[in-house]
Image (cartoon, grey):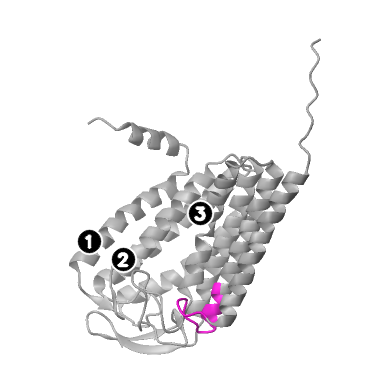
Amino acid sequence: MRHLPETRTLYRMTKTWHRPTLWLARVMAALTLVALGGLLFDGRVLQGSPVWLKPLKFALSLTLYSATLSWMLSLAHKGKRWTSGLGTTIAAIMFADVGMIVVQAARGTFSHYNTSQDFWNVLTQNMFKYTIPVMFLANVALAVVLSFQKLRDRQTTWGVRTGLYLAVLGMASGYLMAGQGKRATTTDATGHEIVLRGGNTVGAPDGGEHMPVTAWSTTGGDLRIPHFFGMHGLQVMILVAFAVTALALSERARVRLVGVAAAGYTGTFALLTWQAMRGEPLVHPSTLTLVLFAGLVALVAAGVAWTVTLEKATPAPVRLPVRPR
């Protein structure tokens, strides 16, 4: 069988990437197709959403996240043995945890907040109890180690650094869901009564009116929004670093633009978290939320303008001709 040139190019590009996280990205991409099939052929629902929607969202998210980690860990840096081990730990835990989410979806029941005492649910909840903190700490350690490294050029280095810390903030926001004191009784897709402790929605019951595809609440605050937004700050900041590389600016100006983007992204994450904690739906923001967001946009725009103005005001370095010896 002949391989297309694009396939050979992609293979060569990923040949030096971190193998366990790259393997996980491929598994998650395959799971995306399986979950799509579940959406098409399995009509069961949990709290008004298809049972295969959660595996689909996790698969798509972790395809992006693990592929990004795989590329990032391939960059030249000190302590690669340690960072590789941390990446492998993260990949193994993600694989195991998403595996249990798939098992619970196939059973037609909840994978999170479920207090049922059957074998599979007890196994799932105990796995989450111990593996999620370990994965979180592994990501924190990875961010700390790479904070003292120079990866490629300075804008890429800062893109990776800020992106990793944004991802850590996004992961940490997940504890707000589990820490909610709410308790609800509902039924799963098989008709069994389930008691849920914790939840995604603030100020409204989980499973109420929601947005299509994402299933984010339209009647209350939804903590999944800052969780998602923060976790994927890693991809966004790396893309920003790549984008500013193409600009005809000095390296110092490019780094400043990455910093402005990181500050704007962090501010937006904080605003989304605050909005969700107030029980305010994303699609129905209050006047105060809109004013704060407009102020944030203005500050980012001012930061970009300041960077460009400073760049124009700074004279280009004069290169003296080299005399032949």
Which residue is under mark 2?
102
Which residue is under mark 1?
37
Question: Between residues 231 and 242, which one lies in front from this camera angle?
Answer: 242
The answer to which image quadrant residue 94 occupies is bottom left
Question: Between residues 179 and 122, which one lies in front from this camera angle?
Answer: 179
Q: Position of residue 218 (x, y in %)?
A: 41, 80
The kind of residue on which mark 3 rests is Gln
Residue at horizontal 69%, vertical 41%?
Answer: 250
Q: Position of residue 237 (x, y in %)?
A: 56, 54
Q: Secondary structure at mark 1?
A: helix
CB under 8 Å between discs 2 and 3: no
Which residue is under mark 3?
235
Q: Position of residue 273 (x, y in %)?
A: 55, 75
Magenta span contains residue 284 = yes
Q: Earlier in the sequence, mark 2 or mark 1?
A: 1
Residue 209 tag number: none
Does residue 148 appear anywhere in the picture? no
* Magenta stretch bounds: 272-285
The answer to which image quadrant residue 251 occupies is top right
Q: Secondary structure at mark 2?
A: helix
| Disc 2 from disc 3: Cα separation | 25 Å
Q: Secondary structure at mark 3?
A: helix
Q: Position of residue 308 (x, y in %)?
A: 69, 49
The kind of residue on which mark 1 rests is Gly
The kind of residue on which mark 2 rests is Val
CB under 8 Å between discs 3 and 1: no
Of tags 2 and 1, the one toward the viewer is 1
As displayed, is residue 186 above or below residue 164? Answer: below
The answer to which image quadrant residue 53 occupies is bottom left
